[in-house]
Amino acid sequence: QVQLVESGGGLVQAGGSLRLSCAASGSIFSINDMAWYRQAPRKQRELVAVIATGGRTNYADSVKGRFTISRDIAKNTMYLQMNSLKPEDTAVYYCNTYLRTRYYAWGQGTQVTVSS
């Protein structure tokens, strides 16, 4: 059973930066398109960024140009560099596969709070 552990969240002022990490207990990043998701209070979970097995990336329009997804396959770790943060980025951030049918068990997520 693969475990996903997100970390790196925190409280930051608008305009600041954070780097999130997603550590997996197995070698999953070379065999799955992976993604970062977020869920704000009283809102549905939304897709933030995707990195395909070949390295191609894609972003939600709301974060394009500010967030960067990357991974270190050897370390079984994926990252989300978040710059120019806005209050509307406040959410719990999760990592998982991009394909719903291949979801692993969800981790606890990491809270990101951006103050104005």
Image (cartoon, grey):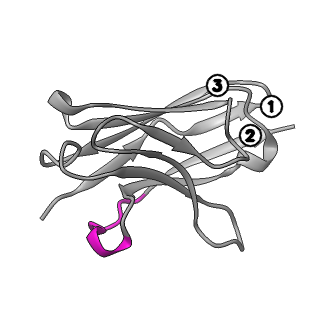
Q: Which amino acid does label 1 sit on?
A: Ala
Measure how far apart labels 3 and 1 are at the Cα level. 9 Å
Residue 101 highlighted magenta (yes or no) = yes
Considering only vertical position in the picture, is 4 above or below 75? Answer: below
Q: Name the residue under label 1.
A: 14
- Which quadrant: the C terminus? top right
Tell me the CA gap for discs 1 and 2. Answer: 6 Å
Instruction: State the image coordinates of residue 39 (x, y, percent, origin top left).
Output: 60, 62
Label annotation for residue 114: 2
Magenta residues, dominant SS class: loop
SS of the residue at dot 3? loop
Q: Which label is found at residue 93?
A: none
Taking the magenta stretch, the answer to whether it contains residue 17 is: no
Quadrant of the rendered structure where residue 40 is? bottom right
Q: Where is residue 46 in the image (x, y as percent from the top left)?
A: 60, 63
Comparing 67 with 25, the one in front is 67
Q: Do the residues labelled 1 and 2 touch (CB within 8 Å)?
A: yes
Q: In this view, does 111 lie to the left or right of 41?
A: left
* Residue type (three-letter) at the residue carrying disc 3: Ser
Tell me the residue at 70%/67% (across/down): 41
Secondary element under disc 1, as helix, strand or loop, is loop
Residue occupying the point 68% across, 41% down: 63
Q: Is residue 38 above or below residue 105?
A: above
User: Which is nearer the N-term, disc 3 or disc 2?
Assistant: 3
Q: What is the span of residues highlighted in magenta in the rendered image?
A: 100-108
Q: Which amino acid does label 2 sit on?
A: Val
For label 3, the residue is 17
**Mark pair 3, 2: CA separation:** 10 Å
Q: Which quadrant is the N terminus positioned in?
A: bottom left
Using a 10 Å C-alpha cutoff, classify the residue at mark 1 as few (fewer than 14 neighbours), some (14 to 19) or many (20 or more): some
